[in-house]
Image: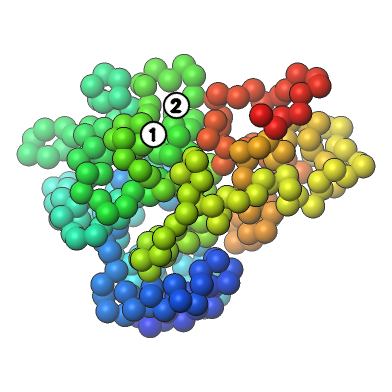
Amino acid sequence: MSVTRRDFLKYCTASAAALGISAAEVRALAKALLNGGGPTVLWLQGSSCSGCSVSFLNHVASTTPHDAADVLINVINLAYHPTLMAAAGDTAVAAAAAASLAPGHILVVEGGIPTAFAGNACWAWSENGADVTFQQAVTTHAQAAAAIVCVGQCSAYGGIPAAPPNPTAVQSVKQLTGLPTINVAGCPPHPDWMVWTIAKLVAGAQIPLDSFGRPTELYAKRVHDQCPRKEKDEEAESFGEHGGCLEELGCRGPWSQTKGNCPKVKFNDKANWCIGADAPCQGCTNPGFPGTEPFFHEEGEDGDD
């Protein structure tokens, strides 16, 4: 069944409380969608595992639109995404070029940006017979974007591709371009966090950011401060033990910059989250994840630095 923009309005209204979108912002979002005036989205993928796109595709609902396919095909003007779009080759490159010229377009970047070897460790596409590096593509398209959204650790901070020894000299988007970015942190981010950010931008709402470029409404509290196992007397002594606090097993939830509402939103259609599955928090929203900080602290350290 085809999904109309009016269907999407109903979905946004029903989901506003869950996503933290105000009634006024829903009205602004509805106006943009119903008038077909929502900004064009150009989504580039670089040095990454495509896990952020997979997470985005896991944004599902019981009401229309039921899944990401309905949103992408019938609602959102996603002009370029190398994994999701049907077009390829010159047709896809032309779509990216056209999207970059669209007034008020949003650039979404997934993946780190290799800068060693003149950027040739990662190519975005070929144009007029010449290979275009991901470094060149991001540099070019970032200049014209009304907003730059970095989805995931790799584009926001370097992430796993930039972990030592980082032979391809991967950088974040902000490191490369010097431009301000909205960093949707996580490895991968929760799908609601990505939808929330794009919906806010479409609605023309301001997005307050913390010192690491993360939306403060999404990354306001430490995971530890919301954890149902916080400071429980019972501590897990080995991996896989159910119900105990996992701090002594290297849980990064208590770390000062491991922030997010993971205990509330959960993952995989709200089925569970890391600690709920008896796995220590990996601190994947921390800008230092994974390679600049030790997994375990020396005895006596509190893990809050």
Nearer to us: label 1 or label 2: 1
Q: Residue at x 15, y 50 (%)?
A: 97
- Residue closer to the observer: 131 or 101: 101
Instruction: Give the left or right position of residue 167, taking residue 291 as reference.
Output: left
Mark number displayed over residue 172: 1
Residue identified by numbered label 2: 162
Instruction: Give the left or right position of residue 251, taking residue 236 as reference.
Output: left
Quadrant, the C terminus: top right
Work out whether 227 lies above or below 116.
Answer: below
Mark 1 → mark 2, Cα distance in angstroms: 9 Å
Task: Report x, y in % for residue 265.
Answer: 63, 59
Question: Residue lying furthest left in this view?
Answer: 128
Q: Residues within 10 Å of mark 2 (few under 14, many from 20)?
A: many
Q: Quadrant of residue 200?
A: bottom left
Q: Identity of the amino acid at label 2?
A: Ala
Q: Identity of the amino acid at label 1?
A: Ser
Q: Residue at x 44, y 32 (%)?
A: 158
Q: Residue at x 7, y 39 (%)?
A: 128
Pointers 1 and 2 in contact (CB under 8 A)? yes
Q: Earlier in the sequence, mark 1 or mark 2?
A: 2
Q: Residues within 10 Å of mark 1 (few under 14, many from 20)?
A: many
Task: Report x, y in % for residue 75.
Answer: 34, 71
Q: Residue at x 72, y 38 (%)?
A: 254
For label 1, the SS is loop
Q: Quadrant of residue 246?
A: top right
Task: Report x, y in % for residue 189.
Answer: 52, 49
Task: Report x, y in % for residue 145.
Answer: 25, 51
